[in-house]
Amino acid sequence: MKNKLPAAPYLVWMIVFILVPLIMVAYFAFTDKDAHFTLDYVSNVAQYTPIFVRSIWLALISTVICLFIAYPLAYILIGMNTNIQSTMLMIVMLPMWMNFLLRTYAWMALLGNNGLINALLGLVGLGPFKMLNTEGAVVLGMVYNYLPFMILPIYSVMVKIDKSVLEAAADLGCNPAKTMLKVVFPLSLPGVFSGITMVFVPAISTFIISRMLGGGGNLLIGDLIEMQFLGNSYNINLGAAISLVLMVIVLLIMTILNQFGADDDGVMVI
Amino acid sequence: MSENIITLKDIVVEFDGERILDKINLEIKDKEFVTFLGPSGCGKTTTLRIIGGFLEPDSGDVMFDGQRINGVPPYKRNINTVFQRYALFPHLNVYDNIAFGLRIKKMPEKAISKRVAEMLKLVNLVGYEKRSITRLSGGQQQRVAIARALVNHPKVLLLDEPLGALDLKLRKEMQIELKRIQEQLEITFIYVTHDQEEALTMSDTVVVMNGGKIQQIGSPVDIYNEPTNAFVADFIGESNILRGLMIRDRLVEIAGNEFECVDSGFGENTPVDIVIRPEDITLVPPSESKLNGIVESVIFKGVHYEMLIEGYDFQWIVHSTKAAEKGASVGISFTPDDIHIMHRMKDDDVKEEIAENEE
Ligand SMILES: Nc1ncnc2c1ncn2[C@@H]1O[C@H](COP(=O)(O)OP(=O)(O)OP(=O)(O)O)[C@@H](O)[C@H]1O
Ligand SMILES: [Mg+2]
């Protein structure tokens, strides 16, 4: 009993700020305006399937791109001496010190039809290209904003890999590429998984990025939910229902992903 | 082709301007069992890392089978290593750790499982195949490290204190097993230890190192009986090391008395260091010896008694199966054969190194 005492504040925190809101979301999703039980809203969510698919698809692409940029970067980083490592990490983190909205506005200014990039291309007689208000712009915005969340966990797992284990691999006949494949990669998987989670989850529910860089035509779930609570189509019951479905989908995807992570005990290395 | 499998020529290594290896010259014959012996921090691991290819010397040549191999990466050298800190793969189980090298060489799985099974038997870990490395004791991890390197049957095996984490009984068993394997598979073993007994019992050749320099290279018997200096004598076993004066060939002055000895070639009236092994001394009645003392202490050591005799200006260590009476007056006696004469080391060296060694 005594041991549980220090945990009490955290318990209260979790109940007040996590459990209660979750229950409220579920409550609103399954009731109508007169507080009667109904499945209407939840079943209505099905009509938004295309938006769900687009959201998952764009979040997936962004996550994969982040992974492909972050992984080699982390690997290069750990090979450098520690001073350069921390400087490079600083640079990676630098954009995060700027306000999220500001960063995204900056991309609008760059990508617009009269933006900086098209202006420069115009000088050499190219363009203008439509870049703003496309899916590509949304993906770019996600990658740009969430990349640090992929780099950090991968880097922090990789940097802890004992250098002597890499020497052992070389000793047993692995060239650098094989060492990477057979030792570094399997050992860095936990970092990869948490990186994927940390990018995928915010990416699938974002609404600012899609609003600002995607224009009206690239609505994502996040936008949809926001509209139910703050927009003119005010309908908190539907909003709660969509949120609930989104939560279930994310949970499912994470469970599948963790399944991969769980059985990496030697099986991942063939 | 030379019959030397490994040759080190004038190897120098410096870290942050500090000289860690100072002109190491060494020739290792094929199929030889060579042991590096020396106190902590003397450069044993560094020398192994040079041979393994994990560290490039600042100057000097590394030769393998007559070829210069400076700059050749470890994975291209037919050498395997048992690392001092094991360096096992934490994501693999015992079996996969041991099979790692053979899989890289693309050996068929069937042959691999046979080899791994042999190794597991050798290191006494049958039944642990599926165990995760992180759930093994230190000694078990060490044995996996031995198996993982040995299973590849390399030309040369580097072993960095491979038995350090084992209990005495298991260590003795593994010593015998390793020696047997080494002879059976005809692998050149380069072995590091700071256990002098292990070095003397297992090796064909012992290399005594100190402060980044090789002190002596020789067979265990040579090293024990003819240490070249006071450091080697002291490190290789508890010893009485005295100052003396070589009067002329075969005559030496110890503690003011002249003794016959068997050494020559030191010149006349040369200051020398003298080693007399504790087990070579016999205690006699005071009247029968030129050197007398009082028995300070008598400690039972299992096989023998260790006695400290407070003599004039010098405290003798004597090993004998017969205990003397504490406080008794005794004479110190030895034969000319038992007097080992060595060149005097520089004063400071001796004091410093012996002090270090006694920590
Ligand atoms: N990477 C390094 N950078 C700086 N100094 C080092 C480095 N590696 C080793 N040294 C120094 O080199 C010296 C020799 O080290 P080495 O590991 O070869 O000793 P050793 O004989 O193996 O000792 P032990 O018996 O304790 O393992 C030590 O003084 C150590 O501090
Ligand atoms: Mg060492």
Image (cartoon, coloured by chain):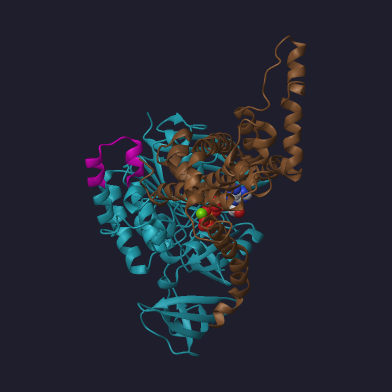
Chain colours: A brown, B cyan
Image spot of residue B221 (x, y percent) = 38, 57
Quarter of the picture containing the N terminus of chain B is top left
Instruction: Please tell me whether the stretch drawn in magenta is mainly helix, strand or loop.
Output: helix
Quarter of the picture containing the C terminus of chain B is bottom right
Q: Residue at x 47, y 89 (%)?
A: B326
Q: Nearer the viewer, residue A1 or B110?
A: A1
Range of residues picked out in magenta: B99-115
Is residue B320 placed above or below B167 in the rendered structure? below
Image spot of residue B240 (x, y percent) = 51, 70
Q: Which residue of the protein is positioned furthest toward the top in this rendering? A: A125
Number of numbered discs visible in the structure rendering: 0
Q: Nearer the viewer, residue B350 or B272?
A: B350
Image spot of residue A214 (x, y percent) = 65, 31
In the picture, residue B243 is in which quadrant?
bottom right
Q: Which residue of the protein is positioned furthest toward the front in this rendering? A: A34
Q: Residue at x 64, y 44 (%)?
A: A233
Is residue B284 placed above or below B172 in the rendered structure? below
Horizontal side of residue B79 vs B347, given as left or right: left
In the picture, residue B131 is in which quadrant?
bottom left
Q: Residue at x 63, y 73 (%)?
A: A9
In magenta stretch: residue B106: yes
Image spot of residue A34 (x, y percent) = 57, 60
Asked whether residue B245 appears in the rendered view, the answer is no
